[in-house]
Image: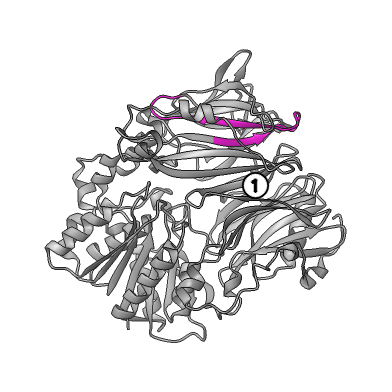
Amino acid sequence: MRGGSLSKFHGAVLLLMAALSARIWAAQPPADLASAFGTLPQVSHVVLSRSGHMLAWRQQSRSGVGIVVYDLVAHAIRRTVRIDTSATLDGLQFEGDSTLLMEDSIIRSFRETFGPGWGSQPILWNHVMAVDIASGKIRALLVDRLAASLNVDEAHVATAVRLLDWDLSQPDTVIMEAAGANARASTLFSVNTRTGEEKQIASGDAFTVHWVLDADGSPMARLEWWPDERRCAIYAPHGNSWRQIYQRTDGFLPLLPGFDAATHAIIAVMPGSDGRRHMWEIGLDGSAPKRMLPAVSDGVLSVDVDGYADKPTDVWLLGRSGAYRVWLDATLQSRYEAVARSFPGRMISDYADTQDGTEVLAEVESASEPPVYYLINFATHQAKIAGEKYPQLDHTTLGTARALNYQMSTGQTIHAQLFLPPGGGKNLPLVVLVPGGPVESVPEQFDWFAQYLAVRGYAVLRPDIGLDALPSQGGRIMWGGTSQQYAIDGVHALVQQGVADPHRVCIAGAGYGGYAALAGAAFSPATYACAVSINGISDLPSLLADGSPLWGGGTPGPAPLTAWRLEVGSRSDSKLIAESPVHAAATVTAPVLLIHEENDPVVPVSQSLEMMKALQKLGKPVSFVKLDGADHVLEQGDDRIEALKSVGAFLDKYLH
């Protein structure tokens, strides 16, 4: 291992932000808990340049939101860029040391974008901007392609311009994808970040859902998906055209994390004959896939690929006791484990290194400790704090969190996280907090919502319903009353342990978790004393009629929406109607709190309004809070604070 022991990490010092006019982590004790936990991260999206000379981050302060670029060599701020508070920052990335790339998305209606005469339906615009660090000039990349991708005949449009990779062989050059809705082809461009000059390098079609690039940004493969046929295929370049090198007809869409230059093969994660997901090599010559890691029997969750060396570095596997990591590169493993040992009991949720491997940027957190960014130097054996996400919580005693495994009535083991108030307790009021969807459960990460509830005196059960956590579901979205059994059995387990009071149990969640909360109230009324749905779904047929392509993961074109309909069902399906809480409002006995963003582009606010009207018509206790924002995950303005205040007051009324 280069650099030797990192034992000195425990003596980390504050350094990087000292040049700011006011230290953003020097917060005073919070005026109230909702503000403390609901304030958006003060430092986030921290990135390190490949040379290790530059650092950038998103900074939230009373004066606004901006991007700060810091020179680690000169120990000085090089540039501060104000950004639109109505936009969601999706990522930052350096192109060399002279250009910072910013990706964001913004919700705008047709009328706002094009003027009178257009409808009010919200659409999602994705932007990529290149910031010249020296001059401060900002250039929007592929902006003409973005506008051209809009199909004005389509009622619901998601336009996309995405940054895919950088071209290591060409300075100031990145690889981007431009796509639009309704049969607009996914197209790759090589773009000069300084001049904006673009060059088309490859084109797919409306069914292209993924590209695989090599280290220099050249397209090595594209993945096509025809959901109506339950068929997918991988194509590789062949002269001036493309040829098919692999196909599946079982409805499973492979995960293609990258390209292995050493073997000239596409890396794929997909099931084998045993039904488990394995890691495979698919040769560019069309030869039969070869299974990698043949000695490993546990299922593969994901694969990380080194963008510099263009090879897989590590694999995440799912075993009986949960997810674990297997390294494929001994040097990288040694460095990573040295870092991990310096932060016992915490997880490294984000990890990026410089091109020469001498420095890394690590985001460190646990379920009970807010995220902190560390800049780690293997030559000096030091770790320096680069920023804290929630410095205002430094003076707040947080709840304790521990892993919890319990048995379902089916005999299956469920992994969960249990949060307890500071000091613990017995027969506590319990909140079952359902994650937002089958790919969003990360038990070890800091959860501001769960901690807010725990500090207020509630026990919080957060079951893991992540990908493959419920094998009988195959990683699919779970609908209906019977699919919520994991939550009911979790409640029973905590009651038997004496942790929870069976008469004071609430179910809550956002997005899919909001649906689960309403389903719990409608289909398991004897279990819950109240329910909280934030931006939740109440009417599945109505959601399908709305037809938002964002339910396909934000990828434009007909394929994602068709796949979503196959996943959920058709609008006329009687089972789908029966699984919609709005059609079971008569069975709801517990008070319900509905919170919804007015311009949520993923789940329309009409979903909560329909539920409210159905409950009011039957004389059921229901409250509705409409937020002014235009996002789905409470990351704009003061919406998060308002939501927490509403939830806190509601729980105090019905669980105490």
Seen in the picture, residue 8 relative to 351 is either above or below; the reply is below
| Towards the viewer: 563 or 608 | 608
Residue at 58 percent of width and 26 percent of height: 188
The image quarter containing residue 570 is top left
Q: Which quadrant does the C terminus fall into?
A: bottom left
Which residue is label 1 attached to?
Answer: 295
Amino acid on which disc 1 is placed: Ala
Percent coordinates x, y for residue 177 in the rendering: 55, 31
Q: Residue furthest left?
A: 618
376 horizontally vs 529: left or right: right
Q: Which quadrant does the N terminus fall into?
A: bottom right
Percent coordinates x, y for residue 125 in the rendering: 46, 39
What secondary structure is marked by label 1?
Answer: loop
Residue at 40 percent of width and 42 percent of height: 108
The image quarter containing residue 51 is top right
Which contiguous range is marked in magenta?
162-184
Seen in the picture, residue 580 relative to 200 is either above or below; the reply is below
Percent coordinates x, y for residue 556 in the rendering: 43, 33
185 horizontally vs 110: left or right: right
Percent coordinates x, y for residue 262 in the rendering: 74, 32
Q: Residue furthest top?
A: 240
| Towards the viewer: 377 or 489 | 377
Question: Does the magenta segment cover residue 167?
Answer: yes
Q: Residues within 10 Å of mark 1 (few under 14, many from 20)?
A: few
The image quarter containing residue 412 is bottom left
Q: Does residue 356 appear in this view?
A: yes
